[in-house]
Image (cartoon, rainbow, N blue to C red):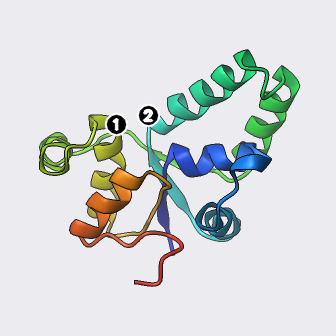
Amino acid sequence: MPFVLDASVTASWAFRDEQHPHADLALERIRTDQAFAPTLWWFEVRNILIVSERRKRLSEAETAAFLRDLATFGINLDIVPETNEVLRVARAHQLSVYDAAYLELALRMDTPLATLDIDLVRAARVESVRIVGENA
């Protein structure tokens, strides 16, 4: 079953000390299921990696290897969010527009959301969006 992938889950795959059962499940699922993300995911993931290089958590070689591995999953980027719905979700749940973009995509696709962001999880539950790793 397809799902929406956010940067928090993706980032946890890059760091051994940030592993989480929900992120592990998303990684398992992405091997057989389609994953979708708003285009901002591309920028968020790379920003996390470059900041991690600056903080000496990753080397350039580790970043390159991670991005090569990530590319094998063929994550589908959604380039046209529904603007009014993104703004509605952001307003209704006090989310950043960035986080609202992930939730809007999951709502539009009627598919689960893979996130570790507490505020985004809370908003998704209110909007009846399933969270990868939760049974409900």
Q: Tell me residue 44's x, y (percent).
A: 52, 32
Q: Which mark is residue 14?
A: none
- Quadrant for the C terminus, please: bottom left
Badge 1 marks a residue whose secondary structure is helix
Horizontally, residue 116 falls left or right of residue 12, namely: left
**Residue 91 in view here:** yes
Q: Tell me residue 33's x, y (percent).
A: 60, 69
* Of the pair 61 and 52, the residue shown nearer to us: 52
Q: Is residue 58 above or below residue 38?
A: above
Label 1 CA crowd tier, 10 Å (few <14, some 14–19, many 20+):
some
* Measured Cα–Cα span from mark 2 to mark 1: 7 Å
Numbered circles on residues, count: 2
Q: Is residue 67 above or below residue 6?
A: above
- Residue at the right extreme? 61
Kindly identify the amino acid type of the residue bearing the numbered disc 2.
Answer: Leu
Horizontally, residue 111 falls left or right of residue 42, namely: left
In the rendered image, which quarter is residue 80 located in?
Answer: top left
Kindly identify the amino acid type of the residue bearing the numbered disc 1.
Answer: Tyr
* Of the pair 122 and 13, the residue shown nearer to us: 122
- The residue tagged 1 is 98
Q: Tell me residue 5's x, y (percent).
A: 51, 54
Q: Is residue 46 above or below residue 96?
A: above
Tags 2 and 1 touching, CB below 8 Å? yes
- The residue tagged 2 is 40
User: Which residue is found at the position 58% from the left and 52% from the top?
Assistant: 9
User: Which residue is found at the position 54% from the left and 73% from the top?
Assistant: 133
* Of the pair 73 and 47, the residue shown nearer to us: 47
Q: Earlier in the sequence, mark 2 or mark 1?
A: 2
